[in-house]
Image (spheres, rainbow, N blue to C red):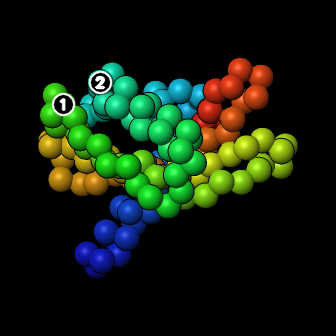
Amino acid sequence: MIYKRKKSLNFLFFITIIFVFSISSSNAQFFVGTDAFKQSDLDIMHKNWERLVEEDIVNKPIIWSNPETGHSGSQEVLKNYNDEDGLRCKTVKYVKKSKHIKNVFTYLMEKCLDESDGVWKFK
């Protein structure tokens, strides 16, 4: 019974994450919440993203930690591909840890390059 309940909770969490990502726009607002990333966390993650893109790093996570907020995690490009519209895209794995919560949150996101402005945006 406990196993089924845990499995149901995991499924509910997965569906919630999918919903959150489906309504997210081209920014990182989905990371904002009760124990959310602060601007300093997002700044670190943005610098790591730039490094992942500039150095074309794939399947090698970049680990980060912010002593100011107690948040840490990693970012990793899992694959590069062209989408159905021919845009350059990347599947990115974000891992978030918090000093306040024991759980580790993993997000799989798709980011594509908008060639009109040169900005990588969440799909």
Near-viewer residue (80 or 10): 80
Q: Amino acid at mark 2?
A: Ser
For disc 2, the marked residue is 40
Q: Residue at x 29, y 43 (%)?
A: 64
Q: Quadrant of residue 69?
A: top left
Q: Secondary structure at mark 2?
A: helix
- Could you tell me how far apart the alpha carbons at marks 2 and 1 are, in whole angstroms? 8 Å
Residue positioned most to the front: 55
Q: Earlier in the sequence, mark 2 or mark 1?
A: 2
For disc 1, the marked residue is 69
Q: Which mark is residue 22?
A: none
Q: Residue at x 25, y 75 (%)?
A: 2
Q: Residue at x 36, y 61 (%)?
A: 9
Near-viewer residue (121 or 22): 121
For the C terminus, give its image quadrant.
top right
For the N terminus, give its image quadrant.
bottom left
Q: Residue at x 83, y 49 (%)?
A: 84
Q: Quadrant of residue 8?
A: bottom left
Residue 103 appearing in the image: yes
Number of disc labels: 2
- Residue 98 located left or right of residue 22: left
User: Is the Cβ of the residue at disc 2 closer than 8 Å to that at disc 1?
Assistant: yes
Q: Quadrant of residue 33?
A: top left
Residue 31 appearing in the image: no
- Residue 79 located left or right of residue 68: right
- Residue 4 located left or right of residue 85: left
Q: Position of residue 62 (x, y in %)?
A: 38, 49
- Residue 59 located left or right of residue 61: right
Q: Position of residue 5 (x, y in %)?
A: 32, 69
Q: Position of residue 76 (x, y in %)?
A: 46, 52
Q: Amino acid at mark 1?
A: Thr
